[in-house]
Amino acid sequence: MQNNVLILDFGSQYTQLIARRVRELNIFCEIKPYNKVPKDMSIYKAVILSGSPYSVRSEDAPHPDLSQIKGKIPLLGVCYGAQYLAHFNGGLVAPSNTREYGRARLTNIKNDERFFYEIIDGSQVWMSHSDTIQELPEKAVILASTGDVKNAAYKIDGELTYGIQFHPEVYHTTQGKLLLENFLVHIAGLKQTWTPDAFVETTVADLKQKIGNDKVILGLSGGVDSTVAAVLLHKAIGKHLHCIFVNNGLLRKNEFQDVLDQYQHMGLNVKGVDASARFLDALAGVSDPEEKRKIIGKSFIDVFDDEAHLVEDAKWLAQGTIYPDVIESVSVTGGPSATIKSHHNVGGLPDFMKLKVVEPLKMLFKDEVRRVGASMHIEDERLGRHPFPGPGLAIRILGDITREKVAILQEVDAIFIDGLREWGLYDKVWQAGAMLLPVNSVGVMGDERTYEKCVALRAVESTDGMTADWVDLPYEFLQKTSNRIINKVPGVNRVVYDISSKPPATIEWE
């Protein structure tokens, strides 16, 4: 497919937003670390260089070889990317007298340039840098300025190379999406054909070619990702797909049977495996969040290895991995991005397991997965299900895992989620859940002093989980939910509500 955009990531907090804006234009793009430029660039019709917390003047600044890109493929440098193109091509980047951060207005726009087609003079943009381009490289032409930044936008004559010292991907840049459209559609010539229907058509065709008549095992979770992956694979290989839903003992209350019942009418070949004892025994005494994730990942592998031997000639393991899983599990080597958490469904399989991995959704964001599911006529109720972490309640129980703690949290979670549905709030929340904290607090019930557990409720709104804001739930709802939890769940005497956003917090507590 030669309708791709490559985004080279220099460690900016906004890189994923660039990808989101590009895909909103129905153009496919992918993110690669700056130091892993693909050797074969023939599938890309445009390249975008992200921002970065680094200075191009520092000795350890990211410095990729762009010789196969610059002057050969339409290229847009954003913030650090623009300064990089200037600094390493004869221009001068120097510290700014004042940190250029926040809103600014474009002035002196070169209106006859296609890059600024229909961008109005005075259009608001968002700045975020401490260096500035004092002198442009040879053959560079200024396209726009701001009140404080002379070289806010420029192009290289004779090339389709552009640089901007502001961020078009953030909402504060009011015409940022139009600017990206001008570059990608009107300059690079990309076609806006990447739609859910097109994704289904090409993915099903690719799966047929890749898998053929081989048998595939898919781990279902009941969530959006694995359900959409299952339907895609079913379209491609039909009866050769063998779905397994594992009870790891860390699911929501009654979820194991409820999910099996839901899949009965979808035409999928689904087998339920109760491995709860296996998981909980393996987790006994473990408190470290990363260690818990690794144990759960290994246990899943062991269960699927056992089940794979029961499916004669199984060749593939399918997973519902999505793009944020991949992004959060791969840091920019040598850059500021850190691995936030490991994902049990990212990173392949151990050598002893002779299954190949297929991940039909690994390039999609969560909202894109839902749109693909809708295009395949999956029920709204199933597509609207809140995300639930692969490790389940294990990462919502801070500290070590016991069967008693799981039972307590299942009851708390059920009251919270059922309450959201009763109050008509469930569909207004992107993800919700409860955390069991590793602390006891003093309380009074009747005439008796108690010393029992504290739980934290969490509800966030988001598009894809990369960023999230806490939801301002009605006080009356929180009050009644708190009362129900304390009165009905033995062992809990205190309820708190988490009002942290991502970043700096994460959606889950572990």
Image: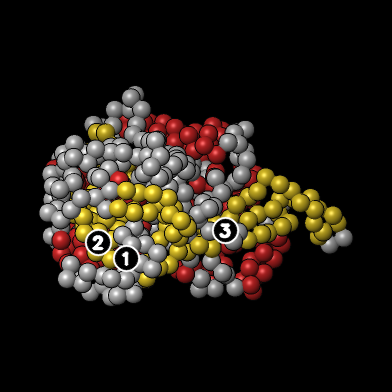
Disc on the earlier residue, 3 or 2? 2
Say if 125 sits above or below 261 in the image: below
Q: Residues within 10 Å of mark 2 (few under 14, many from 20)?
A: some
Amino acid type, mark 1: Ser
Residue at the disc numbered 3: 500
Say if 404 sits above or below 463 in the image: above
Left or right position of 108 against 502:
left
Residue at the disc numbered 2: 142
Q: How many marks?
A: 3
Between residue 289 and residue 427, name the one nearer to us: 289
Element assignment for label 3: loop
Element assignment for label 2: strand
Cα separation, mark 3 vs mark 2, equals 42 Å
Quadrant of the rendered structure where residue 241 is? top left
Cα separation, mark 3 vs mark 1, equals 37 Å
Residue in view at x 42 percent, y 50 percent = 95
Residue at the disc numbered 1: 145
Element assignment for label 1: loop
Residue in view at x 71 percent, y 57 percent = 494
